């Protein structure tokens, strides 16, 4: 069989990526950069790899390499979650009048209860003197929030009230997790 006409199945742009240049190697290469600044943009990682190796890697490889490096430097989400209760209990033990509360819910696989897993909903912590001092604040409360991105999404809310001396007073800080 002979094909006639223009051949159109080849991409007009030739890839500068290397198939053996994986996210593990990228993670090793950018370890110091990410350790110095975890918010390093993916475009900077791509440019760095182009500079040191001469290959323009894909956005996906750069992102995966950055995620691996962040996990190596700071640990993963699951390990951090496992340490959260211990950290808050230690704070309660050593910091006078420290208050915290964590909400979780059972996990389900379809309609079956998954007894080995729970779902984190929210955590609340505050120093008791901040709660006690609220009665001295003006009746104006300001709420500000920011969205969390990545594997775990949610919203962090900061609640502030203004005291008579025009100083700001932080109120209880909730962390909300949303689906």
Image: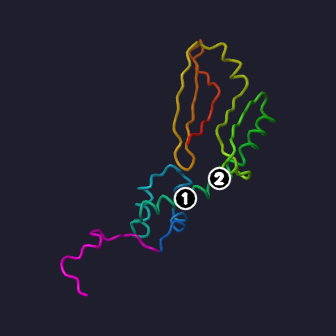
Rendered location of residue 18, percent (x, y): 42, 73
Q: Is residue 173 left or right of residue 89?
A: left
Mark 2, other Cα within 10 Å: few <14 / some 14–19 / many ≥20: few
For residue 124, which quarter of the picture?
top right
Q: Residue furthest right?
A: 93
Q: Along the horizontal axis of the image, is 72 left or right of 87? A: left
According to the picture, the residue beneath numbered tag 1 turns out to be 32
Q: Quadrant of residue 119?
A: top right
Front-most of residues 148 and 53: 148
Which residue is nearer to you in this view: 147 or 56? 147
Q: Residue 133, how many percent across, how many down?
A: 68, 17
Whether 148 is drawn above or below 163: the answer is: below
Label annotation for residue 109: 2
Judging depth in this view, the residue of 19 and 154 nearest the camera is 154
In magenta, the rendered stretch is 1-19
Q: Is residue 163 left or right of residue 62?
A: right
Quadrant placement of the C terminus: top right
Residue 67 against residue 11 in the figure, above or below: above
Q: Secondary structure at mark 2?
A: strand
On whether residue 8 falls in the magenta region, the answer is yes
Whole-angstrom CA distance, mark 1 to mark 2, is 40 Å
Most common secondary structure along the magenta stretch? loop
Colour mapping: rainbow
Task: Specify the quadrant that holds the N terminus.
Answer: bottom left
């Amino acid at each position: 069989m002979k094909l006639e006409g223009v051949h159109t199945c080849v991409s007009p742009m030739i890839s500068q990526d290397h198939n053996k240049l994986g996210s593990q190697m990228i993670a090793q290469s950018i370890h110091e950069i990410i350790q110095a600044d975890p918010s390093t943009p993916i475009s900077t990682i791509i440019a760095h790899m182009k500079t040191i190796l001469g290959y323009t890697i894909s956005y996906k490889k750069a992102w995966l390499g950055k995620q691996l490096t962040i996990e190596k430097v700071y640990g993963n989400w699951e390990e951090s979650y496992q340490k959260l209760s211990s950290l808050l209990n230690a704070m309660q033990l050593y910091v006078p009048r420290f208050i915290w509360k964590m909400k979780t819910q059972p996990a389900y696989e379809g309609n079956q209860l998954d007894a080995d897993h729970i779902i984190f909903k929210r955590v609340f912590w505050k120093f008791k003197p901040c709660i006690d001092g609220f009665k001295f604040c003006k009746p104006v409360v300001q709420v500000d929030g920011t969205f969390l991105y990545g594997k775990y999404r949610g919203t962090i809310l900061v609640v502030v009230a203004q005291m008579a001396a025009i100083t700001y007073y932080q109120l209880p800080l909730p962390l909300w997790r949303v689906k």
